[in-house]
Image (spheres, helix red, strand yellow):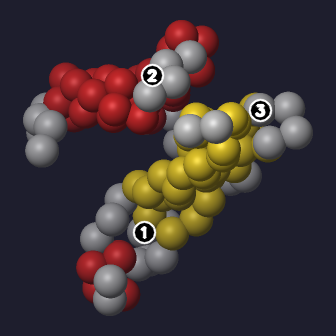
Amino acid sequence: MDDGALACIGQAAFMAVQRVGPGRVKHRVRSLWEADGRGGHRAIFEWRAEDDTFRVVAPVAEEPLLVAATELMAALQAEGPTAFEEVRERVLAWYGRESGVGSR
């Protein structure tokens, strides 16, 4: 991906896949990044493996969409879906409702 295409991405989540048994894996979001408004990106949350929590790396604006996204992440963490497909479907459904853009 060239720098121009990367600059068009508003948010990016990086995932970790951990083997937890024969034929079983656990997925975790390792970090969440957002556009910095200057063509680059900055980390805003990082996963802490030692206690399975997220650390705030940078201040986050309290805009309504971000608040709603934070609530979704808290709900997913509390409910504990284990399959990537389930999390993906929930996020896509939420994205279509909250942003008005619709799932792709």
Using residue 94 as the reference point, say whether residue 101 is left or right of it. left
Q: Quadrant of residue 90?
A: top left
Please name whichever residue, 77 or 27, is drawn nearer the observer in this view of the structure.
27
Q: Looking at the image, which residue sits at the far right?
A: 50
Q: CA distance from mark 1 to mark 3?
A: 30 Å
Whichever of callouts 1 and 3 sits on the residue coming sooner in the sequence is 1
Q: Amino acid at mark 1?
A: Gly
Q: Amino acid at mark 3?
A: Asp
For the question of whether residue 76 can be seen, the reply is no
Which residue was labeled with disc 3? 52
Q: CA distance from mark 2 to mark 1?
A: 24 Å
Tell me the residue at 88%/39% (across/down): 50
Q: Quadrant of residue 28?
A: top right
Q: Relative to 79, say whether 103 is above or below.
A: below
Using residue 52 as the reference point, say whether residue 31 is left or right of it. left
Which residue was labeled with disc 2? 72
Using residue 104 as the reference point, say whether residue 83 is left or right of it. right
